[in-house]
Each structure stands twice: as C-alpha cells, then as structure tokens.
Amino acid sequence: MKPLNILISNDDGVYAEGIDVLYAYLKKAGHKVKVVAPDRNQSAASHSLTLEYPLRVQKINKEDYLAVKGTPTDSVYLAVNSLLDTKPDIVISGINNGANLCDDVIYSGTVAAAVEGRNLGLPAIAVSLCGNTHYDTAAEIVGRIIDRIEECPIPSDRILNINVPDLPVEQVKGVRVTRLGRRMSSESVIEEKDLRGHPIYWIGPQADALDKAEDTDIYAISEGYVSITPLHIDLTAYQVLDDLSGWISKVY
C-alpha cells in the first residue's frame, strides 16, 4: 500500500514509551508520521476541550514531535486544524500504557483523541496495551490493521478501540471482534491526610468485571486475543425512542 500521512496522539503524554515505539514502527514501515500529544500525562481526561485559557505548543528534542499544554482532544484538534502542513490520512491514539476495556472508554483520553479524529472526518483508531512491557506487539498489530485501511476503510461514524494483550507477538492467539464488557460500579475512595493533617482523597481502583461474556473485550484479552471493538459516535439510544415518546406525552 502507499505510505500514509499518520497523526499520532495519546493521553499518557508526548514522552510516553508507547508513543515512541509506535512512531518508530510506522516510520520504519515507510509512513509519514507526526506526533502531537499532551506535554504531560492526561489519563482519564475523556473528551475535555480547553476553553478557559490559550493553548501553548512546544517543539521537543525529537523529530516530528510537538507537545501541547492541553488535553488529548486539544492535541488532535490543533494538529488537524492548524499545526500540520498536510492533512492526515488517519489518526492513531496510543499505544496506551494499560487497557481501555469496558466502561473505561467513557473516561479514556486515548479513546477521546481517536474520537476527535473521527469528528474531524478522519479514520481513527485507539490502541492500548494491557500492561506496560510488549509495546512492540501492539505496534505490529497496528501496522497489520492499517495495511487494511485502504482496501477496507473504517466506516465514517466509527472508531476502532483496540486492546492488545501484554505478550510477545508470537504468543498472541489471534484477533477477535468484540463488544464492550461492563464493570461493576466502583465506589472506592481512599482518604488520607496531607503533611498538614488536612484530608485528601484518591479515586479508588477499577472495579471487577460484571459482564465478561465470551463476546466481550475483557474476555478476549483474558484469553490472550487482541480485542477490536467498533465504537459509535452517536450516543442516542434509538431502541427506547418510542417508549420515551409515550412516557413524555403524559408529562406535558
């Protein structure tokens, strides 16, 4: 296939290992790659957009890299609309340090960066490594997938959320197309004291899986498979529109 103009972003920050491994892999494959990512870790930033203060962009000591003092969404928005000389053919967000499974996609800045790419009319994928060791495996999976983009484009209203088991590539069992699983409601808050005795709070760890049926992303990962989940941009619950119309008619 012809070389692609690829924009990489993430939510772990421009200095994250995953972004370096993905950049190196795609450059070696012959693609034209630019990195525009937050200047620091923005995990769980979701789809936040900075409106209260101006955004600053800095060149760092890496070719093709720009650091944005903002969110993942800011980074992709600025890159496509202002910073890049050539419009990207695809936006790739990742490789994230840690999984983005189940309800994680609601909070994930990694997924949000891909969604922003799709909002701007570009094919987009989010890729996460379910661990922090075998980034090379995730990069190779991404390479195989984008090789299919020209022949089989991603539908215009979807992004692909890809999770990769933290294994050597030869130990990955294959790829499964999955739906999102579901976690139990997490209500854990950790309360501590600062050095002056004032209370501080930490959001607790993720809850265990509630829905991990065989067709879910979390099950595929647990079995050593890559999970690919197509995500909607449109959040409308179409199946309840008629019922809601009947209900609301009795309210007003």
Image (cartoon, rainbow, N blue to C red):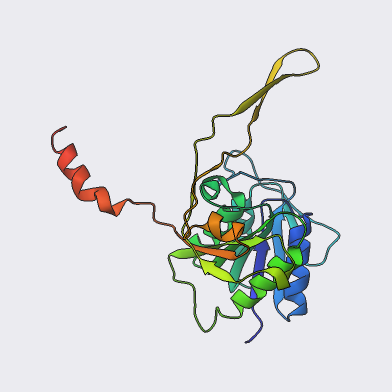
Does residue 19 appear left or right of residue 148 in this picture?
right
Q: Of residues 194 and 64, which is closer to you in this image? A: 194
Query: Where's residue 136, x and y in %?
Result: 75, 67
Direction bottom: furthest residue: 1
Query: Where's residue 90, x and y in %?
Result: 59, 71
Direction right: furthest residue: 61
Does residue 130 appear left or right of residue 62 in this picture?
left
Q: Of residues 58 and 213, which is closer to you in this image? A: 213
Dividing the picture into quadrants, the one containing residue 246 is: top left
Dividing the picture into quadrants, the one containing residue 190 is: top right
Does residue 29 appear left or right of residue 93 in this picture?
right
Residue 53 higher or lower than 95, as above or below: above
Q: Residue at x 50, y 51 (%)?
A: 212
Q: Quadrant of the C terminus?
A: top left
Q: Of residues 235 and 32, which is closer to you in this image? A: 235
Residue 88 higher or lower than 135, as above or below: below
Dividing the picture into quadrants, the one containing residue 59 is: bottom right
Q: How many marks?
A: 0
Query: Where's residue 198, x and y in %?
Result: 72, 14
Q: Is residue 69 visible to us here?
A: yes
Residue 138 higher or lower than 189, as above or below: below
Q: Quadrant of the N terminus?
A: bottom right
Q: Residue at x 48, y 52 (%)?
A: 181
Q: Residue at x 63, y 63 (%)?
A: 224
Q: Is residue 84 visible to us here?
A: no
Query: Where's residue 94, x and y in %?
Result: 67, 60
